[in-house]
Image (tube, helix red, strand yellow):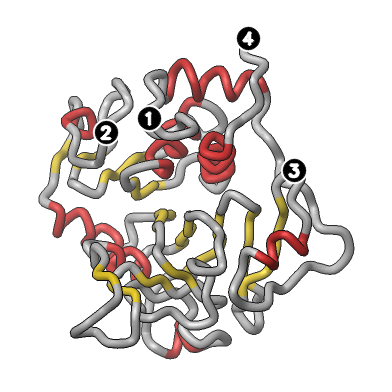
Amino acid sequence: MTTQPANPFEMVAYVLSRQIEDHMIVYVGTGLPMVAAILARKTHAPHITLVYESGGQDPIAGDMPWSVGDPFTWRKSPIIQEMAYSFAQCYNGYVDIAFLGFAQIDMYGNINTHMIGDDFLNPKARLTGSGGNNDLSSLTEKMVLVGLQTPEKFVKKVDFITSVGHLTGGNSRKEAGLLGQGPVAVVTNAGVYDFEPATKRMRVKSLHPGVSFDLAQLATGFELLRPEGEIPVTETPSADVLEILRKEVDPRGVFISFPPK
C-alpha cells in the first residue's frame, strides 16, 4: 500500500473525480479530466458513461489514453461518432457534466483560450482557440473548470471570451439563451470554488491542506468571495484511492507525474 501523499496533479485529479456522480454521462477531454473520469468509474461511480471528445463512446477499459484521439478511447466502443456529432450530444441534452481548462478565467467563470492582449490582430500571444470548448460551455448541463491558480490566469476581465461562463453575473447567462447551469465548480492547485447563487461570482468552497484564504487571494486577480464561517479543508484521497490512481488508472504517470515527465 502506498504511503506517499498525493502530489498536486493527483490532488486535482481526485477532486475532479469527486465532482462526478454515479450514472452521469461524462464528457471527457485530454489530461487530468480524463484521469478523473476513469478514477471515478473505478471508485465511487462505476455506472458512468464516458463520452470522449473525439467521438468514442464508453470504450472498454484499457491503458491510459495519451489524448482523446488515442485508439484506447475507441476500444470496443459500442459507437464511434464524428466529433461534430459528439458535440451535438451536449445540445440534445445527453451530457451531464464536462470539464474545461483555461488560459484566463474571470470572477464569473468566463474562459479565454484565444489570445493574450487587447489587440485581436496583434496579440501578445495567440493561443489554441476554442475547438469544442464553447459548445461545451454553452450547452452542457454542468461545467467544471480546471487549471493552475495565478494572478495572470485569474483575472478581473478576460482578454477574450472563448467559452461563456456566467457572462456578467446574475441571470445574464439564462437571458442570453444558453443552456445548462454553466460552471458549477472551479478546481485548482489551491482549492475548490463555486459560484454564489445570486451574483454568480466565484466563491471559495474549500481550500487544499496548507492553503489559507489570504494565500488563495494573493493568487487571484479579483476579489474572491468567502463562505460564512470557517472555510472547509478539501478532502484528500485515501491510501486505497491513491493506490488505484497510481497502479490502475495512470500507472506510467502520463498525467499525474510531478514534476511532469
Q: What residue type is labelled 2?
A: Trp
Mark 3 Cα-neighbour bin, 10 Å: few <14, some 14–19, many ≥20 = few
Q: Which of disc 4 and disc 1 is earlier in sequence?
A: 4
Is 68 placed left or right of 144 in the picture?
left
Mark-to-mark CA distance, 3 and 2: 30 Å
Is the residue 216 above or below the residue 125 in the image?
above
The single residue placed furthest to the left in the displayed view is 82
Look at the image and tell me whether residue 21 can be seen: no
Mark-to-mark CA distance, 1 and 2: 13 Å
Q: Nearer the viewer, residue 136 or 77?
A: 136
Q: Nearer the viewer, residue 24 or 136?
A: 136
Q: Which of disc 2 and disc 1 is earlier in sequence?
A: 2
Residue identifier under label 2: 66
Mark-to-mark CA distance, 1 and 4: 23 Å
Name the spot of residue 248 as percent of width and height, x first. Answer: 44, 18
Residue identifier under label 1: 261
Q: What residue type is labelled 4?
A: Met
Q: Which of 26 and 155 is in front in this view?
A: 155
Residue identifier under label 3: 209
Q: Which amino acid does label 3 sit on?
A: Pro
| Secondary structure beneath label 4 | loop
Q: Which of disc 3 and disc 4 is earlier in sequence?
A: 4
Q: Residue at x 60, y 78 (%)?
A: 200
| Secondary structure beneath label 3 | loop
